[in-house]
């Protein structure tokens, strides 16, 4: 065999190893958390409030809390993200404004999540006096999710063929009518996938809700948007770092991690696979 | 009437489109406003290069050099993991995998990206740290080394996805030309495709770095949390993000400790901002070079 063939064999083997190692870690994370988490999962664990100083009972308030905060965040980021993507894809005149908007979306996507947390603390908790609450947490996470919603919607909108728009305009429809009746309905599946993806992202975020929404322990379910809540991701962290019964708490943390993982992977996984199919169809 | 309605819609969308910019500017203003008071008590130079972080002592010391150093070490370590794994996986996906393999493997990489950071942190704390402690005979598994490893795994899908995008921009004609002069696939890859996608791949690395520097929960749970200047990679450390997350809950609002944590966040923001701008400039040039606009 010639040297160039040997180097090709070695090189390709190395690349294959890289892929394998990456997948190995994916498998390891899912395996360990599933194997140890499944032992504590029961109907009671999913539906009861915590008992006996966090060592018994369930984590239902944390599941409910995560649900509320996530839905709140989407309610914030959806209208803003949609409008922004529609502007960028359908209206935007080329120019400096568009570049500034694009630049700020990219940079907002790169802001560390803990910085969003501080922003939420200073603005929503302190300045607007919403306190540590669902409202503050949702607003904070909503801003964090904004770039995700925008880029997913943009991708869906650009996949709509130009000829559809032209046909609509040629029939005498106005720009807004074209967007409302032609572009948005066509792009809807893609937009929905993007929204599902951002739900998965938001549900697992911890750092932004540390000081804006989450509390370690409450026996009550939230009764208004101004209640502080338990949340699954924060609960995992708190179980590992606070409290007086490390052994029992670790078991519960495995259970929470499994619930969170199943929740996020089911949501994101669905979106990822749907998007994959759409991309193949569009290509 | 219809024309007024049309204009109105356009104005509404234009106004809402600026929301990202408003939030970004809002974040900058808040960080400056809440972080700046610390520089009345501590000189900027002493804050950045002070060797001692004792915010709750009497008198307190606000030197964040140990925290900066910790972030730097952990990020560097993460890069050593995520660059080979991420770029290698991207090359595999783009060059070697069949269409069917790719349609399974790419979503799996994306799933790895969607695992919440707190789950990575938990995995690092429960599995990676004890395993490394036994394997390497170190006093504690919760240290800079473990944090780098977990953070690296976490940043791998980011690097992989962006690098894969960059590779797919390389025109087919480049490869065909290389095959035509007798190069094999590996030579084409190393001498044509990688150089052509080089700036795209460096964008991927910069964004992976940005992700690692700003990551909070993983380092908070795995890095060990000791705010002293590390002597070896097996020392527990406290990167900037974990200092903010761990201490903000205890810092009384309006105290110097509170302001110092916002000042750390400001520095963190500026670092990631610089990374993102650099990545954007490089990737724009890259696309123009390969004949894709926008």
Image (tube, rainbow, N blue to C red):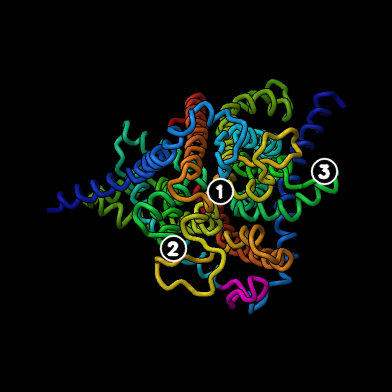
* Label 2: few (<14), some (14–19) or many (≥20) C-alpha neighbours in 10 Å: many
Check chain identity for marks 3 and 1: say if they share one: yes
Picture layout, residue A193 above or below residue B140: below
- Of discs 3 and 1, which sits in the foreground? 1
Q: Position of residue A157 (x, y in %)?
A: 40, 49
Q: Chain of mark 3?
A: B
Picture layout, residue A73 above or below residue B157: below
**Do residues under tags 3 and 1 come within 8 Å of each other at their CB atoms?**
no
Q: Which residue is mark 1?
A: B247
Q: Chain of mark 1?
A: B
The question of residue A58 being in magenta is answered with yes
Q: Secondary structure at mark 1?
A: helix
- Kindly indicate the quadrant of the structure image that contains residue B86: top right
Q: Residue at x 85, y 46 (%)?
A: B135
Q: Residue at x 43, y 62 (%)?
A: A133
Figure quadrant of the N terminus of chain A: top right
Q: Position of residue B79 (x, y in %)?
A: 66, 35
Q: CA distance from mark 3 to mark 1?
A: 27 Å
Q: Which residue is mark 3?
A: B138
Q: Residue furthest top?
A: B181
Q: Could you tell whether A210 is left or right of B91 in the image?
A: left
Q: Position of residue B273 (x, y in %)?
A: 48, 34
Q: Position of residue B3 (x, y in %)?
A: 15, 49
The span shown in magenta is: A46-60
Observer-nearest residue: A169 or A80? A80
- Kindly indicate the quadrant of the structure image that contains residue A158: top left
* Label 3: few (<14), some (14–19) or many (≥20) C-alpha neighbours in 10 Å: some
Observer-nearest residue: B115 or A238? A238
- Of discs 2 and 1, which sits in the foreground? 1
Q: Could you tell whether A86 is left or right of A40 in the image?
A: left
Q: Which residue is mark 2?
A: A134
């Amino acid at each position: 065999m010639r040297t160039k063939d040997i180097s090709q064999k070695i090189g390709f083997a190395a690349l294959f190893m890289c892929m394998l190692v990456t997948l190995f870690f994916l498998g390891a994370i899912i395996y360990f958390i599933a194997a140890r988490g499944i032992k504590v999962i029961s109907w009671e664990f999913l539906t009861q409030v915590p008992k006996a100083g966090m060592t018994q009972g369930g984590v239902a308030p944390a599941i409910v809390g995560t649900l509320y905060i996530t839905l709140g965040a989407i309610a914030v980021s959806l209208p803003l993200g949609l409008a922004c993507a529609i502007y960028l894809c359908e209206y935007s005149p080329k120019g400096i404004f568009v570049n500034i908007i694009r630049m700020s979306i990219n940079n907002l996507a790169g802001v560390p999540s803990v910085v969003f947390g501080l922003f939420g603390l200073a603005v929503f908790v302190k300045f607007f006096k919403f306190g540590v609450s669902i409202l503050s947490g949702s607003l904070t996470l909503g801003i964090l999710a904004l770039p995700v919603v925008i880029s997913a919607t943009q991708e869906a909108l650009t996949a709509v063929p130009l000829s559809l728009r032209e046909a609509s305009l040629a029939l005498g429809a106005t720009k807004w009518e074209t967007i409302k009746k032609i572009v948005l309905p066509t792009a809807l599946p893609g937009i929905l996938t993007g929204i599902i993806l951002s739900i998965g992202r938001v549900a697992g975020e911890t750092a932004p809700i540390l000081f804006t929404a989450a509390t370690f322990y409450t026996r009550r379910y939230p009764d208004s948007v101004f209640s502080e809540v338990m949340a699954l991701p924060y609960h995992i962290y708190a179980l590992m770092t606070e409290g007086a019964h490390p052994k029992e708490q670790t078991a519960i943390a495995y259970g929470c991690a499994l619930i969170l993982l199943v929740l996020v992977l089911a949501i994101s996984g669905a979106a990822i696979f749907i998007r994959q199919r759409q991309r193949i169809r569009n290509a | 009437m219809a024309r007024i309605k049309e204009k109105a819609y356009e104005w509404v969308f234009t106004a809402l489109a600026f929301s990202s910019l408003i939030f970004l500017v809002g974040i900058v203003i808040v960080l400056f406003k809440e972080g700046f008071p610390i520089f009345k008590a501590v000189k900027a130079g002493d804050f950045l290069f002070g060797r001692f972080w004792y915010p709750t002592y009497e008198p307190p010391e606000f030197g964040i050099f140990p925290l900066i150093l910790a972030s730097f070490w952990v990020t560097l370590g993460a890069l050593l993991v995520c660059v080979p794994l991420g770029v290698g996986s991207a090359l595999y996906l783009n060059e070697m995998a069949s269409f069917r393999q790719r349609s399974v493997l790419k979503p799996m990489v994306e799933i790895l990206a969607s695992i919440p950071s707190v789950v990575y942190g938990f995995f690092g704390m429960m599995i990676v740290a004890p395993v490394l402690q036994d394997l390497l005979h170190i006093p504690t598994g919760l240290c800079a080394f473990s944090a780098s490893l977990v953070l690296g795994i976490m940043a791998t899908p980011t690097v992989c996805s962006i690098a894969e995008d960059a590779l797919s921009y390389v025109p087919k004609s480049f490869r065909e030309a290389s095959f035509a002069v007798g190069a094999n696939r590996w030579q084409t890859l190393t001498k044509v495709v990688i150089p052509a996608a080089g700036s795209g791949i460096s964008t991927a690395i910069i964004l992976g770095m940005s992700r690692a520097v700003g990551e909070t929960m993983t380092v908070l749970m795995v890095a060990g949390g000791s705010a002293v200047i590390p002597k070896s990679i097996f020392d527990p450390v406290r990167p900037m993000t974990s200092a903010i997350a761990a201490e903000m809950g205890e810092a009384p609002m309006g105290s110097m400790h509170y302001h110092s944590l916002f000042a750390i966040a400001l520095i963190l923001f500026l670092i990631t901002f610089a990374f993102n701008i650099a990545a954007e400039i490089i990737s724009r040039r890259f696309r123009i070079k390969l004949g894709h606009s926008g």
